[in-house]
Image: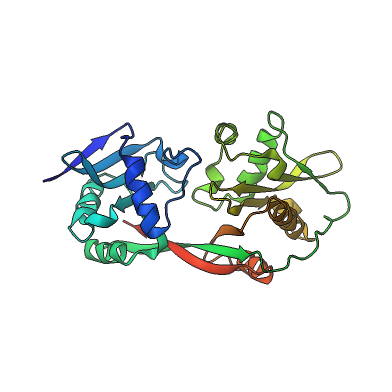
Amino acid sequence: MVKLIWSDDADDTISGLLAAVRAEDGSPEDTEDGSLPAEFRAGRHLIARDGDETLGYAHVDSRGDSFGNRIVELFVHPGHRRRGIGTALVDEVLTIDGPLRLWSHRDHPGAARIAAAKGLTRVRELYQMRLDNSVELPERTSPRPGVTLRTFVPGQDERAMVDVNKAAFDWHPEQGMLTVADVEATEKEAWFDPAGFFLAVDEDDKVVGFHWTKVHPDGTGEVYVVGIHPAAQGGGLGRALTLAGLHHLRGRGVPEIILYVESDNAPALAVYTRLGFTLAYNNVAYQR
């Protein structure tokens, strides 16, 4: 008999469930040591268990996004799907008061069926785009006069980078919430590499933009975040930062480079498409 159990602490069996889901679906992302991804370590955990076996899992980010939505991600073991476990997890999550946003990785058809049955509205799409190494990169470009590129210095640049991020992403439900503490916590992750974290600075060394890259445990490179202060946009700064990061990742020998971009961000989509990125899949958020 399947039981649903709420917990404020992550269960040791969750990593095993996520590994099985990842092998079947390609998501969620893996970690260097097989531990829970950072985004699942806090918040609340809803576990579907039959005896000692974990069959399903829902994570609720209690902090939520900048629009006041609590963020939910749900997973069902590939060997136990179409048994009503996903529906049971959703039903239990929907007992939470307040606005909720539930993510479906790779626009999973099972999630779409449950969302339709529960009257949830499809409100957001996040594209994953990929750049194959067979695509030749343009040469690196120089920022406009008065702006240079350098790499991030831990213990020095966190506040300046976060301030630019806040200005650049004040419209974004998650990215705009980044704090200095978040950056400092990420610096402790195994993948963090300041040599792949590029800052655009003016003649007074004031940060006006950045490109933070990431290399995943499987070697895949990522355009993790590109942010330009609104007052510094234009003049090719975004392209210069993007190319600096792409050439760095290629120099690391990554097999391919990925990025995530909002489906309605037409300017960014145009830039990435011109550079050779193609759509791999889309993640979908449903809203109550």
- Residue 132 versus residue 185: which sits nearer the camera? 132
Which residue is pictured at 41% across the width and 46% down the height? 68
Instruction: Pinpoint residue 271: horizontal percent, then vertical percent.
Output: 67, 67
Location of residue 164 (image quadrant): top right
- Classify the position of the C terminus by image quarter: bottom left
Which residue is pictured at 38% across the width and 59% down the height? 25
Location of residue 7 (image quadrant): top left
Instruction: Pinpoint residue 227: horizontal percent, then vertical percent.
Output: 66, 51
Instruction: Pinpoint residue 142: horizontal percent, then vertical percent.
Output: 84, 56
- Residue 255 versus residue 171: which sits nearer the camera? 255
Q: Where is 206 relative to 104, above or below?
A: above
Which residue is pictured at 70% across the width and 37% down the height? 160
Residue 204: tell me if it is visible: yes
Q: Where is 236 relative to 77, above or below?
A: below
Location of residue 144 (image quadrant): bottom right
Image-based side of 274 in relation to 266, left or right: right
Residue 100: tell me if it is visible: no
